[in-house]
Amino acid sequence: MFMGEFQHSIDDKGRLIIPAKFRELLGSSFVITRGLDQCLFVYPMNEWSILEQKLKSLPLMKSDARAFTRFFFSGATECEWDKQGRVNLPGNLRQYAKLDKECVVLGVSNRVEIWSKDTWETYFQQSEGAFNEIAEKLVDFNFEL
């Protein structure tokens, strides 16, 4: 399971060091794609396969399902580590997530998220105040902390 929050920097060539404990769980080959809320999602290959099957099961005749599937797959790229444990983030994904220099790497259960530091701080401040409301709504899904 991925968990934790880490501050890192992207170098001039678009390379990012991912925490060692995340690298170990991601394996030698993994998938990076556009995530929700203007971040990047990083999946180990086994989790990507599960997500791929779920997306394939969406009804092709529904425009929202087609749009969501396009969003995920068109931005997806299979990546590997360099010898220093860095990943080269493709330019289109850096642009989507507004990744410039400072970023935040999050462990979120079955995936890693990569955020620009500014976007994460704004998101966190906005959602921090709503955390109790969100927790109350989750009770509707039989979820308790």
Image (spheres, grey):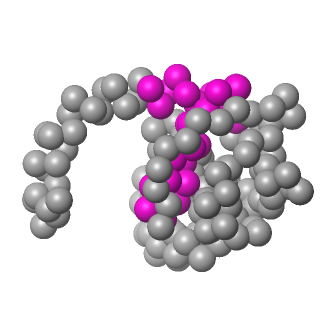
Residue shown at 75% from the left, 68% from the top: 29
Q: Is residue 131 left or right of residue 12?
A: left
> x%, y% of residue 26?
65, 66
Quadrant in which the C terminus appears: bottom left
Q: Is residue 28 left or right of residue 52?
A: right
> x%, y% of residue 132?
15, 40
Q: Is residue 115 left or right of residue 137?
A: right
Residue shown at 60% from the left, 76% from the top: 46
60 in relation to 133, above or below: below
88 in relation to 48, above or below: above
Judge whether residue 64 is colored magenta.
Answer: no
15 in relation to 138, above or below: above
Q: Let me know if residue 141 appears in the view.
A: no
Residue shown at 52% from the left, 69% from the top: 51
In the image as oriented, which residue stretches furthest toward the front?
Answer: 20
> x%, y% of residue 49?
59, 75
Q: Let me know if residue 138 appears in the view.
A: yes
Q: Nearer the viewer, residue 109 or 39?
A: 109
User: Residue 76: which quarter of the image?
Assistant: bottom right
> x%, y% of residue 48?
59, 69
Residue shown at 55% from the left, 54% from the top: 112
Q: Nearer the viewer, residue 121 or 35?
A: 121
User: Residue 65: which quarter of the image?
Assistant: bottom left
Counting labels gives 0
Q: Which residues are magenta?
A: 94-121
Judge whether residue 109 is colored magenta.
Answer: yes
